[in-house]
Amino acid sequence: MKKTIIFVIIAIAFIAVILMFVGKNKQTNEVFETEKAFKTTIVEKTVATGKVIPLEEVEIKPQISGIIEKIFVEEGADIKKGDLIAKVRVVPNEQALTSAKGRVNKAQLQLDNTKIVYDRNKKLYEQGVISKKDIEVFELAYNQAKEDVQNAKNDYEIIRRGYTGSGGSANTNIRATTSGMILEIPVKEGYQVIQSNNFNAGTTIASIADMTKMIFEGKVDEAEVGKLEEGSDIEVALGAIDKKRFPAKLNFIAPKGTEENGAVQFKIKADVKLDKEYFVRAGYSANADIVLEKKDSVLSIKEALLQFDKTSEAPYVEVLKGEQEFERKDLELGISDGINVEILSGVSEDDEIKIWNKASKQEENNQG
């Protein structure tokens, strides 16, 4: 009996000690530090991802189909308008060539017949048998027949060689239509190319762009596009060039968005001001920092102090009322930069606001 009483007393004492330690830990965990609201400048930004591309990129296409015989330039070369880029060797279509030869023969037969008629009536005119008006009709027909023969021969030469005349090779010599840098030559010598026409875009032989005029092209979310304004100053950071930001001016906001991964995105463009110390290549990936809103000297608190109601999700903080006693204050928030948030109403500069994150760290240390 006595042993039982002793064991009971020891058990009670042990439980009392545990409760005492728990009470001390609980009391320690309930100690919160505080800090006050402050005034600062808040800049709300968004980041648009995209790339830098030339303002204008021109694709050079042949005016005649054939085989690339020679390429005279390389990618990256600076060229001027009119410089020779490549030469195309015409491979005539056998059916078209035969048809053109037939038209030449037919026109020649017509010319021979018209000449016989003209010569016969010319003698009659010289003898005074027919009038000048009559001979002019035969002369006109003869001249028209000569023109038809020449046109048929020209068509035949164009099909056979790609050009007509002794010195003409305008169609087979591919020249630059603008000055700039050769960005890409997607063909090689021996490649077959197709001419540009109303039914076919044609084969691109080279693309040329002025690398001194670059733009940023990116996309922003529909939740932020309404805050953008054309003419706004932005900064562009390139993935390939560290620690350098290029100033740019927003000049285009798409009137229509496109859905991507369940979100509607709007295309934007901005003129980039380049730095001569850096060579910016076409297609560099880039991010643009865009200021959506800026407010100077506004009452703010750190976002880490905010709590949100589990039911309404309304923001609130707890303000010191007495010794480690706090009361809830509902807030109306303004803009945020991700670190600080503007307070429109709810607390003042004199209020001591509970710091939640420091208490959490203290609990982790006690548990450790």
Image (cartoon, rainbow, N blue to C red):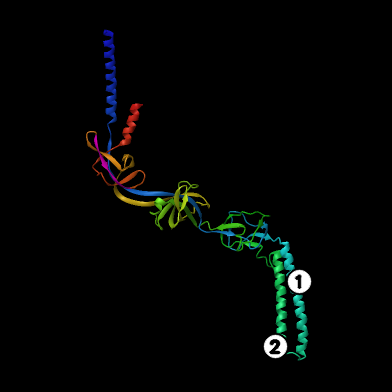
Q: Residue at x 28, y 40 (%)?
A: 317
Residue wearing tag 2: 133
Residue 26, labelled with which disc? none
Binning the other alpha carbons within 10 Å of mark 1 as few (below 14), some (14 to 19) or many (20 upward) gives some
Give the residue drawn at x 70%, y 70%.
154
Query: Is disc 2 in contact with disc 1, using a CB cutoff of under 8 Å?
Result: no
Could you tell me which quadrant the C terminus lies in?
top left
Residue drawn at (26%, 11%) of the image: 5
Picture coordinates of residue 173 (x, y %)?
65, 62
Q: For the stretch drawn in magenta, what is the main secondary structure?
A: strand
Residue 230 image point, x, y percent = 41, 58
What range is drawn magenta here? 325-334
Kindly indicate the quadrant of the structure image that contains residue 35.
top left
Which structural element holds mark 2? Answer: helix
x%, y% of residue 176? 60, 61
Q: Which residue is mark 1?
A: 105
Is residue 105 shown above or below 293?
Answer: below
Amino acid carrying label 2: it is Lys
**Left of 12 or right of it: where is 97?**
right
Q: Secondary structure at mark 1?
A: helix
Q: Is residue 150 magenta?
A: no
Residue 254's place in the image compared with 17, above or below, is below
Residue 272 makes an appearance in the image: no
